[in-house]
Amino acid sequence: MAKRAFPYIPNSVEEIKAELLEDIGISDVEDIFKEIPDHLRFDGKLNIPEPKLSEYELKKHVERILSKNKSAQDNLNFKGGGVWQHYVPSVCRTIAGRDEFLTAYVGDAYADHGKFQALFETASMIGELVEMDAVNTPTYDWSNAIVRSIRMAARINGRKEVLIPASMSPSRKKVVLNYCKPDIKVTEIDFDQETALIELDDLKAKLSEKVSSVYIENPNYLGYLELEAEKIGELAHQYGAEFIVGVDPSSLGVLEAPANYGADIVCGELQPFGLNMKWGGALSGFIASPDEEKYVGEYPSLLFGITPTVEEGEYGFGHVAFERTSYAQREKGKDFIGTSTALYGIIAGVYLALIGPKGLIELGEGIMQRCEYAKEKFAELEGVSIPIQTPSFKEFVVDFSGCSKSVKEINQLLEEENIFGGIELGEKMEEYQNCALFCFTEVHDRYDINKLINSIEMIIEKY
């Protein structure tokens, strides 16, 4: 009796499998795995559902799983920390679903129906925001962009140490530590717990001619503005180090462009620009630099450029210095790259084109106004304080040490009111025990903020 083909695995028809095995010179699929020791192989049957045989059955199965999820659509959400809830205009979803963009895989597609131009336009707008001339195609996320920037700097000056702030995003820090192994030393710069800002004296003590680059985040992970960013850049340059600045680009409608306070390389996250939150994403990083050979020659990722065509008045879009990439050099490449988030980059371009410069200013101003209003309301609560007075954008720290309840307990009770409270910081940063990181964006109106404050007040008084 012939075995039935597996419905979701290509080439599982027995005749096709036999033909493939014959073509590569083996008689059984097991021959492919024979070099794996027995003690490393799973012996048994995986506890997974049987395959659904119809599209309708599969759809219902997935919907049942998804129904267990608690979403920001059904709850008031005040969590941030690297993935933030912003309003996503419907045009972003509409254009993202178009066939010519939905298949916008990195590299050379079988046929380009506007992908190159769309990514060039996105890069151009990001370049205007950060005041840089060269911008790459999107990386996996901000974390990946940081590491690519660090390794670019190391190749530029031949040094093997990077200084990063101890206050940077814990998840991004883990990626940096992992990707810098084994050849780049990562040293953390201390920060002031009361201001959440980098300690300049500690930076000066750790700078040397061995340092390849200094990386900062502005705003930092806790949402505070690195007020001495220009000074940090000057100190880095005194030792010949590259100054790398990581940004949340949604802040650049109200904050100065990094290039204007000395950044050599800028990286950041495109998620605030039209990308819905979903299970840890959607994330998409970018890198920007001056249009100089020493920088452009070290980009591992693709760069798109524009050039006149033979026909007068027409332009073409294509790769810039493709020969420097791992696609061209393969194992001899300076830095390997793989799949990018090209579709997300296109969506970010749609968002930026829609909101425009004036809209980005209004976005930034509205976010800062909401944060200041929320800080005032928090300060009115008994046992609650705002411990850091440094100006912030989008996020800030709230201290619940004066309450009888822990942040974890407060968040659990808030969920009963369909509210996602702030991120518990004590687990991530020992300096801020029983503190939470709250996020406010344009999706929160006065009613939402008041509901959060009133709910916390009720919890404090009742429990």
Image (cartoon, rainbow, N blue to C red):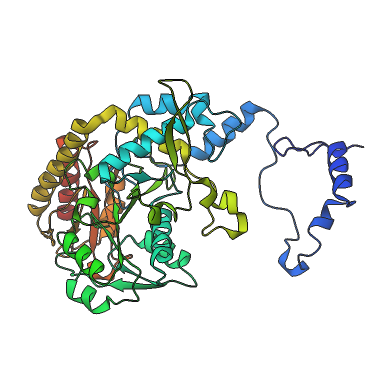
Quadrant of the rendering where the C terminus is positioned: bottom left
Instruction: Tell which of 351 and 55 is nearer to you.
Output: 351
Residue that appears at 54% across and 29% down? 112
Q: Picture quarter containing residue 253?
A: top left
Q: Position of residue 366 (x, y in %)?
A: 16, 38
Residue that appears at 44% across and 53% down? 299
- Toward the bottom, the furthest residue is 205
Q: Is residue 3 visible?
A: no
- Toward the right, the furthest residue is 1
183 sits to left or right of 328: left
Instruction: Tell which of 224 and 361 is nearer to you.
Output: 361
Q: Position of residue 317 (x, y in %)?
A: 46, 32
Q: Is residue 57 visible?
A: yes
Q: Picture quarter containing residue 185?
A: bottom left
**As drawn, 139 above or below 122:** below
Residue that appears at 68% across and 28% down? 54
**As drawn, 143 above or below 320:** below
57 sits to left or right of 350: right
Q: Position of residue 184 (x, y in %)?
A: 43, 71
Q: Position of residue 45 (x, y in %)?
A: 73, 53
Count the marks: 0
**As drawn, 243 above or below 325:** below
Instruction: Tell which of 106 and 400 is nearer to you.
Output: 106
Quadrant of the rendering where the N terminus is positioned: top right
414 sits to left or right of 254: right
